[in-house]
Amino acid sequence: LARTLCDLGDVLPPDAVERAFDDVVRRGSSTRWIRLTAERLARPNAPGPRLVLRLLDLHESRGTVRDSWFERLVESCLRHPELDDLVIQHELRDEAGRVVARFDLAVPSAQLGIEAHSRRHHFGAAGEASDEHRDNAAGRLGWDVMYIGYGDVRSPSTVLDEVLARVRIRRGQLGAA
């Protein structure tokens, strides 16, 4: 898999390689093994290994990968200076340090969790109950949660406008404007 990622980087766009990288890491492949492979294959005329090394550095700085590519689509809508503290896979902890919620994306300065809302993970009795439990737990800690559906990302500027509006309101409420 590590060699395949490096080879893909030679022939596919970076987004496609990032999607494959996230999937490989999400499935439990060793990032150390991927790094050693990419370093061994690195050559001046081979962009793939260099791309994989950049993805590894990004992964290490974040400490995690997204749960789905849809989350990456939502994240790509949210590139804006006012959202410079956007975090993927943000764990909200209570006073005792227990994880009470995990958001696909979050803007901690606005205490706003953002969920990439998909039928696969959020519909049905179990998904709805899980979301309700998480949202209520987050609400007890003063957090707000918003959902962005797949249809929404077809208009990235609308998603950005909606999130910015909510962030500005939340920061105003929190005195962090």
Image (tube, rainbow, N blue to C red):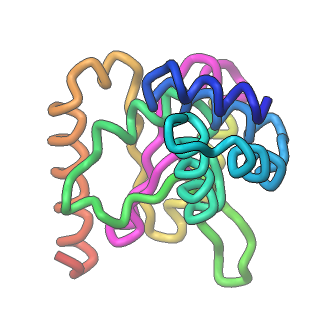
Q: Image check: 114 left or right of 92? A: left
Quarter of the image with the N terminus is: top right
Farthest residue to the front: give it: 44
Q: Nearer the viewer, residue 9 or 82?
A: 9
Q: Nearer the viewer, residue 53 or 30?
A: 53
Residue 166 locus on image (x, y percent): 23, 52
Q: Is residue 77 above or below residue 166?
A: above
Q: Quadrant of residue 23?
A: top right
Q: Nearer the viewer, residue 153 or 172?
A: 153
Find out whether residue 106 is within the magenta segment.
yes
Q: Residue at x 29, y 45 (%)?
A: 78
Query: What is the span of residues highlighted in magenta in the rendered image?
Result: 103-127
Q: Residue at x 38, y 35 (%)?
A: 74
Residue 50 locus on image (x, y percent): 54, 46
Q: Residue at x 74, y 41 (%)?
A: 25
Q: Quadrant of residue 98?
A: bottom right
Q: Nearer the viewer, residue 31 or 99?
A: 31
Q: Is residue 165 above or below residue 169?
A: above
Residue 134 locus on image (x, y percent): 62, 50
Find out whether residue 78 is within the magenta segment.
no
Quarter of the image with the C terminus is: bottom left
Q: Residue at x 20, y 53 (%)?
A: 80
Q: Image check: 82 left or right of 27? A: left
Q: Image check: 62 left or right of 143? A: right
